[in-house]
Image (tube, rainbow, N blue to C red):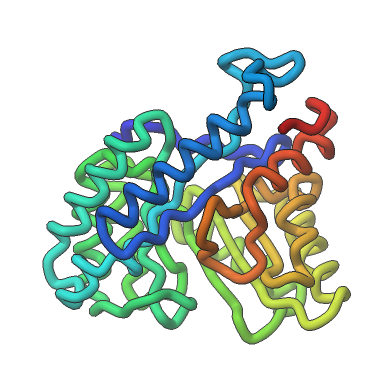
Amino acid sequence: MPRHRLVLDARSPSIIVPLTGRDLPELAEQIGALEAAEAGFRKEPDGALPAGGSPDTDGLVDVVEWRVDLYQPFTTGAGSDPAPAVQALERISALVPGLPVLATFRTSTEGGGAEISPEAYVALVEALSSTGMAAAIDVEYRHPHAGDAITAAHRHRIPVVASNHDFDGTPPAEEIVARLTAMEDAGADVAKIAVTPRSAADVVTLLAATEERYRTARIPLITMSMGGLGAVTRLGGGPFGSSATFATVGAASAPGQLPAQGVRHALDLLSGRSAPRG
């Protein structure tokens, strides 16, 4: 059972910030920067809470994603021993006690920073899930052992974010819908797809496919067009059915991610919840 629940809703999209540190000192530094950004966001320059705010006002960040594939104490051992990753997850959870952690090993095939054997991939998912420190585990839906990885996470009652990244272009809308549907059919608790637009029409395709799938999906969706051309999908995906967006406090983990403070301001404006902050 995870320590935190991952609650996603397209009516109020969550902001997920990646942690990309190569070792524990870098991760601690990034978390320190995140805490400083959070504190600065919650207060006006005079030190008061934003107008109409309270200590319970929505913060800057809703979820942190830890990129395990960039963590060298684990990857330098070719991923054969999950213990360094488990220890790092426990440390991250202690440093961000109030935030859900999405643990992600992104393979090089999907744009990640390292590669491990299929067996080690499943063993990693099993080990991280068994700690209860991850609110969810990312599983690449096209991974050869995706089914085993989903089963491993669910064995420990940890939700799975099934993911797919297309760096070659934007598939037709029907293909995007088919992939998101396949993720749900495979047992995922959240379906995520990121595509690469070559034109404004590709961005429209991604949004149209999201809206189509959202009408019948029984699980939350996370969709985006990467790069500068697709930035609008990172801000305005909610009305089309995307329940979260990835933003930065420091280093980005994918093309086109925007600074978290600007994203939060934009989401607040689009939802009509509040005036701009900061």
Instruction: State the residue in front, 275 or 267.
Output: 275
Q: Is residue 87 visible?
A: yes
Seen in the picture, residue 93 relative to 69 is either above or below; the reply is: above
Instruction: State the residue in front, 58 or 8.
Output: 58
**Residue depicted at 33% across the width and 77% down the height:** 114
Which image quadrant is residue 212 in? Answer: bottom right
Seen in the picture, residue 237 relative to 47 is either above or below; the reply is: below
**Residue depicted at 46% across the width and 36% down the height:** 35
In the rendered structure, the answer to whether residue 129 lies left or right of residue 65 reads: left
x then y, percent, for residue 56: 57, 17
Seen in the picture, residue 196 relative to 62 is either above or below; the reply is: below
x then y, percent, for residue 53: 69, 16
x then y, percent, for residue 71: 29, 65
Instruction: State the residue in front, 247 or 102.
Output: 247
Outermost residue to the bottom: 168
Which image quadrant is residue 239 in? Answer: top right
Looking at the rendered image, the quarter that the C terminus falls into is top right
Seen in the picture, residue 46 relative to 59 is either above or below; the reply is: above
Looking at the rendered image, the quarter that the N terminus falls into is top left
